[in-house]
Amino acid sequence: MTAIDYAYKHGLIVSFDPNVRPALWPSLKRARQEILKALNHCHILKMNQSEWEFLFPGKRFEDSLSMLERKGIGLSAITLGAQGSIIGSYNQWTKIRAPQVKVVDTTGAGDGFMAGLLYEVLKRDKKRLRFEKSELQEIARFANVVGALTVTKAGAIPAFPSLSHVKKYL
C-alpha cells in the first residue's frame, strides 16, 4: 500500500496482477478480502480466469466492466491460457485468441502478457485509460503474442521475447 500511495501522490498509473497463491496467505478468506481491497486502488487489472472466479464467483467478466469502472479500473484483462484473453475498457470488450506455439514452460506467461499490455498502454500515452474496441484488439493481440512467446522457453523473465521478436511474430 505504501507503493500505491507513492504512485497516487505522483500521478502514476497503478497496475495490479493479484497472482493468487493460497499457500502464501493465512486463509483464502483473508486473501480475497485483501485483494478486493487493493482493487480499489488500481487503474489496470490483469488476472487469470481462476483468479477471477475466486474473487467474483458466478460473475462473467464481460458483464462486470461497469463494476470494475466504479472501482476506478479503466482497463481490465483476463488471461485464458492457450485460448487467449478477454480485455475490456468502459463497457467495451474483446476476446482475442492466442497464437499457437510449442509450449516449453508456462512459468511467466501471465507476466509476459502483462508486460505486453503495459507496453501497448504506455505507447499510447493517454491521460485516461479509455480505449476504443480497435485499440483493445491491438493491445490484446500484442499482449497475447508476448505471453505466448514467453512459454516457448524455460524460465519466467529470461524467457520474455525481445520487441523485435514480437513484432516479427505479429
Image (cartoon, rainbow, N blue to C red):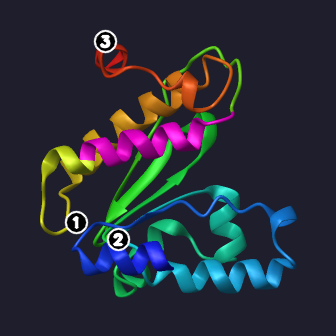
Q: Residues under labels 1 and 3: Cα distance? A: 27 Å
Residue 21 is situated, as x and y percent measured from the top left of the image, at 77, 60
Q: Is residue 111 magenta?
A: yes
The dot on residue 43 is: 2
Q: Is residue 137 above or below residue 149?
A: below
Q: Residue at x 51, y 79 (%)?
A: 1
Q: Residue at x 23, y 54 (%)?
A: 133
The dot on residue 168 is: 3
Q: Is residue 44 above or below residue 116?
A: below
Which sits in the foreground, 164 or 64? 164
Residue 87 is situated, as x and y percent measured from the top left of the image, at 40, 55
Query: Which residue type does callout 1 highlight?
Result: Leu
**Is residue 85 toward the left or the right of residue 119 in the image?**
right
Quarter holding residue 151: top right
Q: Which residues are magenta?
A: 107-120
Q: Are marks 1 and 3 in contact (CB under 8 Å)?
A: no
Residue at the spot of label 1: 129
